[in-house]
Image (cartoon, rainbow, N blue to C red):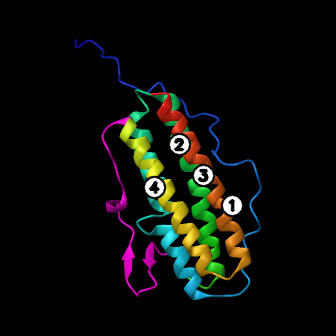
């Protein structure tokens, strides 16, 4: 009779985990008027190469790969991913209110369209490089949101984007703290 082998398992528990975000409310998800051009800009934030879709996927991939060796870091990355999911949801609502489609296709102002793909991700092999890649992605997202705010004249939409930026800045601070602790 073959001896029973001990199964391998992760000892990392994600029970009770909450989104990691600034403790301030979001403005109402509303728009001043339908504007398909603005919907397209937000579609780039939703699922372009620099987007909430990319951030969520990159954070979850990184969390999966380190959860067995560094549970506290994995829990933090998943908490950030949860906040990014909330950003994605708010952007999706704004896109629909503006008269756009949520179909994972980024529509750029130059007319180019590109469907989201994992090719957008930066997936380094070690935890330090993961954190650095995540910080760079957060900085890129902030720059893109700021550019889109300057292009849109809808105070309702811009208020939501401004609040999302606050979370992205907070995420950079959290990632820096993780990096210093390595």
Residue behind mark 3: 169
The reply to whether dot 2 and dot 4 touch (C-beta < 8 Å) is no
Earlier residue among tags 2 and 4: 2
The reply to whether dot 3 and dot 4 touch (C-beta < 8 Å) is no
Q: Nearer the viewer, residue 118 or 176?
A: 176
Earlier residue among tags 1 and 4: 4
Residue 18 in the image: state x and y as whole percent. 65, 42
Q: CA distance from mark 3 to mark 1?
A: 10 Å
Left/right of residue 110 with respect to residue 161 in the rendered view: left
Residue at horizontal 55 percent and vertical 35 percent from the top: 177
* Circle 4 residues within 10 Å: few <14, some 14–19, many ≥20: many
* Circle 2 residues within 10 Å: few <14, some 14–19, many ≥20: many
Q: Which residues are magenta?
A: 103-127
Quadrant placement of the C terminus: top left
Query: What secondary structure is found at the residue carrying circle 4?
Result: helix
Residue behind mark 2: 78
Residue 1 in the image: state x and y as whole percent. 22, 11
What label sits on residue 163 in the rendered view? 1
Quadrant of residue 147 in the image?
bottom right
Residue behind mark 4: 137
Type of secondary structure dominating the magenta stretch: loop
């Amino acid at each position: 009779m073959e001896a029973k082998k001990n199964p391998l398992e992760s000892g990392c528990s994600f029970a009770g985990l909450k989104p990691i975000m600034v403790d301030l409310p979001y403005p109402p998800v509303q728009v001043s008027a339908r504007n398909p051009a603005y919907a397209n800009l937000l579609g780039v934030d939703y699922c372009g190469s620099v987007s909430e879709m990319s951030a969520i996927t990159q954070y979850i991939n990184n969390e999966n790969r380190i959860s067995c060796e560094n549970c506290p870091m994995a829990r933090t990355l998943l908490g950030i991913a949860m906040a990014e999911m909330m950003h994605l949801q708010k952007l999706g609502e704004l896109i629909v209110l503006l008269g756009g489609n949520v179909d994972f296709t980024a529509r750029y102002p130059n007319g180019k369209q590109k469907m989201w793909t994992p090719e957008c991700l930066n997936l380094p092999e070690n935890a330090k490089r993961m954190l650095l890649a995540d910080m760079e992605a957060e900085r890129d997202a902030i720059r893109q949101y700021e550019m889109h705010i300057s292009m849109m004249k809808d105070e309702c939409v811009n208020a939501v984007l401004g609040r999302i930026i606050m979370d992205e800045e907070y995420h950079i601070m959290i990632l820096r703290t993780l990096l210093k602790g390595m």
